[in-house]
Amino acid sequence: MNLSPPSPRPALDAEPLSLLLEQLRRALSAEQVLAGAAEREVYAWDNTGVRHPPWAVVLAASQADVQQTLRLCHQAGVPVVPRGAGTGNVGGALAVQGGIILSLQRMNRIVEISRDDRLAVVEPGVVHSRLQAELKKEGLFWPPDPSSARSCSLGGNLAMCAAGANAVRYGVTRDWVLGVQGVLMDGSLLTAGGRTSKGVVGYDLTRLLIGSEGTLAVLTQATLKLAPVPETKRLLRVLFASVAEATEGVCTLMAEGETPTAIEFLDESALDLLRRSGAVAIPAEGKAMLLVELSGSQAGISEQVAAVVARLQRLSCIELLQAGAEEAESIWAARYALSPTLKKLAPKRINEDVVVPVSRLPELMAGVSALSAEFAIPIVNFGHAGNGNIHVNLLVDPANSEQMALVEPLLARLFQLVLQLQGSLSGEHGVGIQKQAYVPWELDPVSLRLQREMKALFDPKGLLNPGKIFPASLPL
Ligand SMILES: Cc1cc2nc3c(=O)[nH]c(=O)nc-3n(C[C@H](O)[C@H](O)[C@H](O)COP(=O)(O)OP(=O)(O)OC[C@H]3O[C@@H](n4cnc5c(N)ncnc54)[C@H](O)[C@@H]3O)c2cc1C
């Protein structure tokens, strides 16, 4: 099977493109349609560092703007790529086949916060942390917690089914959305789900759209399920002499008793970065660490901590400490800074986010360590161990062609290992253009065929975010 990446669509001739832009300016407003080289450059990037300048950019301010844009592009046969804040890690918001970037950032209203129904109705361009700040005033929060919260948009979170550290207890974006509105490529408006926490009429299109990476519909509104902010939290930091002992610790914590809110894992190299951040003093013999967060009521938290400590004391950890509130805050800040710091340390960092069933975590980490030694490529590992979701960061130098030639073979072996362990290629970053060659390794042929047929049903002309998720070479 040829799994080569999709080839770019030929650029539209200047005349039909300028006609389309003129129609868009008339339907929206002139200032909402950008076609200058500098403006297009701003929307040519995301967090992958891969560059694909679009033909033009439309700044939608309303659902009607989205409908008009899609309808006109559909008629003209021009691809459209929905875009939130552009923090995606897999190139999902890039115009890889040219076309129009449809920015949702101006659709940034928090339409409603209902305490009675514990829900919020939001537009897609709301920045994640802004929603959380508003909800906090009501004693509520929306549980998905990606590390990029200060910059990513809710639309991007839904499209990618984002998640973060507290997915151990709360689950992922998909678990916290009651309903969505979205616009199909032909401009028609789809409403899926609603305001109730139960509902079994028809297929669950809400869950289908979440995680669909902007390939089925442009999300224009979402109804989010909310949770009460826990009264209090505690953070335990647990140091181990080896990665194997730390990952066995994760298995123990997840197999018994109440589920912690978060269990984060850091290997030796990640620990070194934490040491350098000055957030916490870590003895030199420590080779791996778990950050275990617990949350609940003031009355019950001590009992919860005692139960987890008792479980941890059965393990051979070097140090088991409860962080004070201030220390906990700086440890979390340092943990969240790991990814951007790594990016600066190595000439190039390749960040995978594989996930395995928790009980297979020790095998995954042993396998990653063996691959790092075999290919002589440094790998830094940290992540959401309570979900079996580890960020595997390859540190490479693009100037070293011999080393770069080993990257794909190493990744192929990593993905084989993950699938052997009954895991998945991506826990939260998605496929985009980065992992599409490996998608047929994970999805069985029937599932793959149905998924391709679903895409064709939503978008028969293949114009909405083309060239993503599935390898172009696969027959429909
Ligand atoms: C420092 C850093 C830390 C990160 N940490 C995490 C993490 O902890 N967990 C995690 O899950 N991710 C993480 N990410 C990845 C990224 O932040 C998430 O995928 C986020 O959900 C993307 O949101 P965005 O608004 O930036 O989307 P964009 O990058 O703009 O778009 C991402 C995808 O969503 C689609 N899309 C965007 N808006 C819409 C819409 N309204 N309708 C339909 N499709 C749409 C785009 O077409 C694209 O395919 C991190 C990224 C960075 C840079």
Image (cartoon, grey):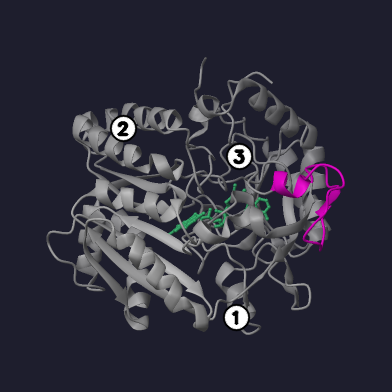
Work out whether residue 318 or residue 229 is closer to the camera in this orientation and state it: 318
Q: Which residues are magenta?
A: 184-209
Q: Which residue is mark 2?
A: 407
Q: CA distance from mark 1 to mark 3?
A: 41 Å
Q: Report the residue at 78% width, 77% height from top.
A: 116
Disc 3 residue type (three-letter)? Gly
SS for dot 1: helix
Whether the residues at callouts 1 and 3 have beta carbons within 8 Å, the answer is: no
- Give yes or no for residue 4 being in the magenta stretch: no
Q: Which secondary structure, mark 2?
A: helix
Q: Mark 1 vs ligand 1: CB under 8 Å?
A: no
**Whole-percent x and y of residue 458?**
78, 37
**Residue position marked by numbered label 3 in the rendering:** 98
Does 389 appear above or below 439? Answer: below
Q: Which residue is mark 1?
A: 136
Q: How far apart are the alpha carbons under marks 1 and 2?
A: 44 Å
User: What residue is at 61 percent from the left and 56 percent from the top?
Assistant: 173
Indicate the quadrant containing the C terminus: top left, top right, bottom left or bottom right. top right
Task: Indicate the amino acid at tag 1.
Answer: Lys
The residue lying toward the viewer, choosing from 382 and 56, is: 382
